[in-house]
Amino acid sequence: MTGRVEGKVAFITGAARGQGRSHAVRLAQEGADIIAVDVCKQLDNVPFPMSTPEDLATTADLVKAEGRRVFTAEVDVRDYAALKTAVDSGVEQLGRLDVIVANAGIGNEGGQLLDLEENLWDDMIDVNLGGVWKTVKAGAPHLIAGGRGGSIVLTSSVGGLKAYPNVGHYVAAKHGVVGLMRTFAVELGQHSIRVNSVHPTHVNTPMVMNEGTYKLFRPDLENPGPADLEPICRMFHTLPIPWVEPVDISNAVLYLASDESRFVTGVPLPIDAGSMLK
Ligand SMILES: NC(=O)c1ccc[n+]([C@@H]2O[C@H](COP(=O)([O-])OP(=O)(O)OC[C@H]3O[C@@H](n4cnc5c(N)ncnc54)[C@H](O)[C@@H]3O)[C@@H](O)[C@H]2O)c1
């Protein structure tokens, strides 16, 4: 049996670890070559350790272990020129582009919107919304030029469909991603390019599994850990689980990237264990 995305090339941001790495590996398992980019350094005001060059190298090794080719670049998604250089070089090396997964994102300090510092707002919007726009702006011309259509998947969040207190800047950016997704779907449909978004609930990655989140969710405890987070996270869901794994999002991305979803466009897809029902 051939792979579900056999022979396609996918451009993935935030690919050094977490969901982005999982998407790269899952798509490679099903036959895709990968253009993997990530900033691979600590950004200001992000209160948990970010990815490293070694993380991106590990992603590349995992893709190669699936027998697929990989092109990597250390790029900040806020830098359109660098993104364009990376994707242009990746396409030159791998020969084509079929799929874009705009996954890179940050979390930073929370707070009520009226109290939020301007720099936290600016960083959030620049990375989690502006970075998604720039990723598609850099990659989509290759989909159009290829003349074979394509699939674009934008990573939003349940926070892109519903409001939560104390993370209004994240909620605003992730709602904005839905606006980008719908507009790109309208504008690129004529080229047979489909555009959809994924909306994960809590995912078991360093963005959630860190000291800052433990303290945010359990201010009642002095030294909270993952086990203390679990009962709180469970309360968000109708299914009896606290969080999902990166591969659960990757399987949704794989479906949207593959021709199995060939007439699906403009869809915000929750992978949320029922979170939207509450
Ligand atoms: N973890 C969750 O619970 C959760 C839930 C819903 C949505 N999301 C979204 O999923 C996406 C992936 O997050 P994750 O859970 O894998 O977290 P993660 O922190 O493990 O991975 C995010 C990756 O994006 C990279 N990145 C961040 N800013 C970047 C920039 N400016 N330029 C290039 N790369 C950058 C990081 O270096 C990191 O490798 C994010 O958009 C996040 O907002 C996460």
Image (tube, rainbow, N blue to C red):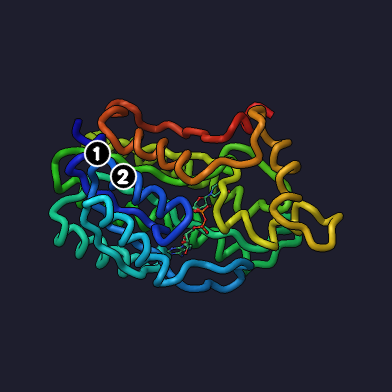
- Quadrant into which the N terminus falls: top left
Left or right of 158: which side holds 31?
left
Q: In which quarter of the image is residue 240?
A: top right
- Asked whether residue 3 is in view, the answer is yes
Q: Mark 1–mark 2 contact, CB under 8 Å?
A: yes
Up-down relation of residue 152 to residue 124 (above or below)? above
Mark 1 and mark 2: Cα distance apart in space: 7 Å
Residue 8 placement (x, y as % from top left): 20, 44
Residue 255 placement (x, y as % from top left): 35, 33
Lower sequence index among marks 1 and 2: 1
Up-down relation of residue 82 to residue 162 (above or below)? below
Looking at the picture, which amino acid does disc 2 mark?
Leu
Residue farthest to the front, as pictured: 65
Left or right of 140: which side holds 160?
right
Q: How many labels does the image show?
A: 2
Q: Which of 235 and 189 is in front in this view?
A: 235
SS label for mark 1 = loop
Residue 147 placement (x, y as % from top left): 14, 41
Q: Name the residue under label 1.
A: 5
Up-down relation of residue 197 to residue 138 (above or below)? above
Q: Residue 27 carries which label?
A: 2
Left or right of 233: which side holds 25?
left
Q: Which residue is drawn at 26% across and 38% down?
A: 193
- Asked whether residue 141 is in view, the answer is no
Residue 77 placement (x, y as % from top left): 40, 63
Q: Which of 167 and 203 is in front in this view?
A: 203
Looking at the picture, which amino acid does disc 1 mark?
Val
